[in-house]
């Protein structure tokens, strides 16, 4: 089965109609025959985006519940080794590429697993290319 690292930017585009793109729709469709892997901080990031959107009245609680139901139905695997890399590889990647530690966790996971990376973040895409991480096409 084909696998790729999925980041929060792509994930959350599926929640907001004004953020979805043909590419992010294609990634969602790809999950019918592929599997995504995410670092252990991904559920917290997703939850935070939903909370902020609710507080800003961009979403209702029911919208968040429906979206989480969608995510729970998808083949998304949460990596349990993210934390073990935080003080080593992740920190080094963040320093070297001027990324947040949060963003560097996605790149570290893609490097460790040797799989493509799906992100909308331009800075992260540039850093991934520099270290030889293949981006999702």
Image (tube, helix red, strand yellow):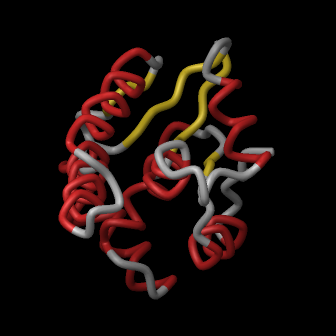
Corner quadrant of residue 127: bottom right
The percent coordinates of residue 135 (x first, y second) are 72, 52
* Front-most of residues 136 and 130: 136
Q: Compared to 44, does 102 lie above or below?
A: below
Q: Nearer the viewer, residue 109 or 59?
A: 59
How far from the left and from the top, in percent, is residue 107?
A: 50, 58
Q: Measured from the top left, where is residue 33 in percent x and y?
A: 67, 12
Nearest the viewer among 135 and 67 is 67
Number of numbered discs visible in the structure rendering: 0
Horizontal placement of 129 versus 98: left or right?
Answer: right
Give coordinates of residue 14: x percent, y percent.
54, 43
In the rendered structure, the answer to whether residue 18 lies left or right of residue 56 reads: right
> In the rendered image, which quarter is residue 62 located in?
top left
Q: Which residue does the image show at 79% across and 46% down from the upper left? A: 22
Q: Is residue 125 shown left or right of residue 38?
A: right
Instruction: Give the left or right position of residue 27, taking residue 62 as reference.
Output: right
For residue 8, above or below residue 127:
above
Q: Nearer the viewer, residue 11 or 116?
A: 11
Q: Residue at x 47, y 45 (%)?
A: 15
In the image, is residue 73 above or below residue 36?
above
Residue at position x 58%, y 50% from top? 17
Residue shown at the point (41%, 24%) measured from the top left:
70
On-image quarter of the N terminus = top right
């Amino acid at each position: 089965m084909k696998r790729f690292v999925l980041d929060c930017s792509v994930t959350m585009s599926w929640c907001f109609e004004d953020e979805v793109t043909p590419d992010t729709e294609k990634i969602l469709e790809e999950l019918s025959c592929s599997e995504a892997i995410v670092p252990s901080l991904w559920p917290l990031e997703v939850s935070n985006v939903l909370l902020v959107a609710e507080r800003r009245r961009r979403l209702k609680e029911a919208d968040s519940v429906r979206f989480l139901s969608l995510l729970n139905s998808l083949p998304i695997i949460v990596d349990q080794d993210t934390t073990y890399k935080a003080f080593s590889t992740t920190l080094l990647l963040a320093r070297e590429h001027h990324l947040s530690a949060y963003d560097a966790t996605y790149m570290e996971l893609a490097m460790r697993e040797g799989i493509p990376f799906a992100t909308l973040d331009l800075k992260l895409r540039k850093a991934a290319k520099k270290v030889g991480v293949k981006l999702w096409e």
